[in-house]
Structure formats: C-alpha cells, structure tokens
Image: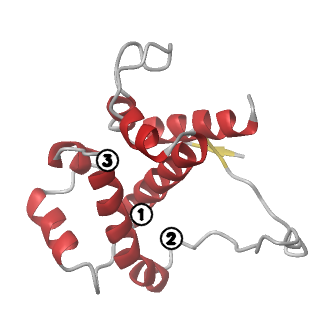
C-alpha cells in the first residue's frame, strides 16, 4: 500500500521482537489521548534538533507546515499539556527520523552541518537538504527514504 508516496507496512499481530531489540508498533496518531501524551516530548525533541541544525525560525516553522510564530514560541516555552495535530506530529516524526539517520551515518558535527550544506546530488539540484525538507511531507519523506537507503547500503 502507498499513501502520499509513503510505504505503509502491515505487521501481523503474531510478529515477534528481534532478540535484543524491542518491538513496538507505531503510535496511533489518530488517537487524541496518544497525541496529548507524546506531544510534549515531540515538541522538546523538535526544538533540540532545530537548535543542533542551527535552523532559523522561518525554517523551523516551514518544517512544521507553517505554524504561526506565536504558537511555536508558546509550544517551545510550555510544551506540557499541548496536543499537536496528526499532521504536525507526522512532520516531527520524520524530522526525528532524519536526525537519527544522519547521526547514524555521519559524525555528530558533520551530521548537524550536512543538513545546511549545498548538495549537487540530482535530488537537491544545488540546494541544501533543508531546502528539500521545507517542501513539506513529500520532501521529508524523500529525504528519509534516501537516508534509510544509505544506511542499508543502497
């Protein structure tokens, strides 16, 4: 199955964890209680990542899909009790995955800088990776797939 270019993987209920690696199904982002539970952590992680990447406020807001600056500041200063919507949590999840993949592939300093370096690869066409991921969920998914492919050796 594919939705908006993303692959949806169906895992049977009888699937077992790999020894040494726990198996947790993804969070159900359609559930308001689950969103309220994970939103404060997601907000904090997103803020830490954008700080590590040295993104501007405008770049951070674009990654969140155009959240208003006062809302973003409110989230960052008081994340507890916030409930992000499904779209915003999906974006934050993709940013976290991109961050994790970069740090699994590069050293910490290179991983945090790479996102801002001009890249001549065809997918970037002389732009930075930040430029690509600011294009929304399709750009975030494209970046995540590329990095997952690198980590898998493709």
At numbered mark 1, what does the secondary structure look like: helix, strand or loop? helix
Which of the two discs, 1 and 2, sits closer to the camera?
1
Q: Residues within 10 Å of mark 1 (few under 14, many from 20)?
A: many
Point out the tag, 1 or 2, that comes first from the N-terminus. Answer: 2
Q: Pointer 2: what residue?
A: 29
Q: Is residue 134 left or right of residue 151?
A: left
Badge 1 vs badge 2, beta-carbon distance below 8 Å: yes
* Residue sitting at x 49%, y 82%: 34
| Up-down relation of residue 107 to residue 120 (above or below) | below
At numbered mark 2, what does the secondary structure look like: helix, strand or loop? loop
Q: Pointer 1: what residue?
A: 89
Q: Residues within 10 Å of mark 2 (few under 14, many from 20)?
A: some
Q: Pointer 3: what residue?
A: 63
Q: CA distance from mark 1 to mark 2?
A: 7 Å
- Image location of residue 84, percent across then percent down: 34, 71
Is the C terminus in the top left, top right, bottom left or bottom right quadrant? top right
- Image location of residue 140, percent across then percent down: 46, 41
């Amino acid at each position: 199955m594919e939705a908006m270019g993303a692959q949806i993987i169906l895992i049977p209920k009888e699937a077992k964890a790999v020894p040494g690696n726990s198996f947790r199904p993804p969070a159900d982002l359609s559930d308001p209680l689950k969103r309220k539970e994970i939103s404060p952590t997601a907000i904090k992680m997103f803020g830490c990542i954008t700080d590590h990447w040295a993104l501007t406020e405008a770049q951070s807001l674009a990654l969140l899909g155009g959240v208003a600056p006062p809302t973003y500041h409110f989230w960052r200063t008081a994340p507890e009790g916030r409930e992000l919507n499904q779209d915003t949590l999906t974006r934050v999840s993709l940013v976290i995955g991109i961050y994790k993949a970069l740090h699994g592939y590069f050293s910490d300093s290179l991983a945090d800088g790479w996102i801002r370096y001009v890249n001549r690869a065809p997918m970037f066409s002389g732009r930075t990776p930040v430029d690509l991921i600011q294009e929304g969920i399709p750009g975030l998914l494209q970046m995540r797939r590329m990095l997952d492919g690198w980590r898998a050796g493709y």
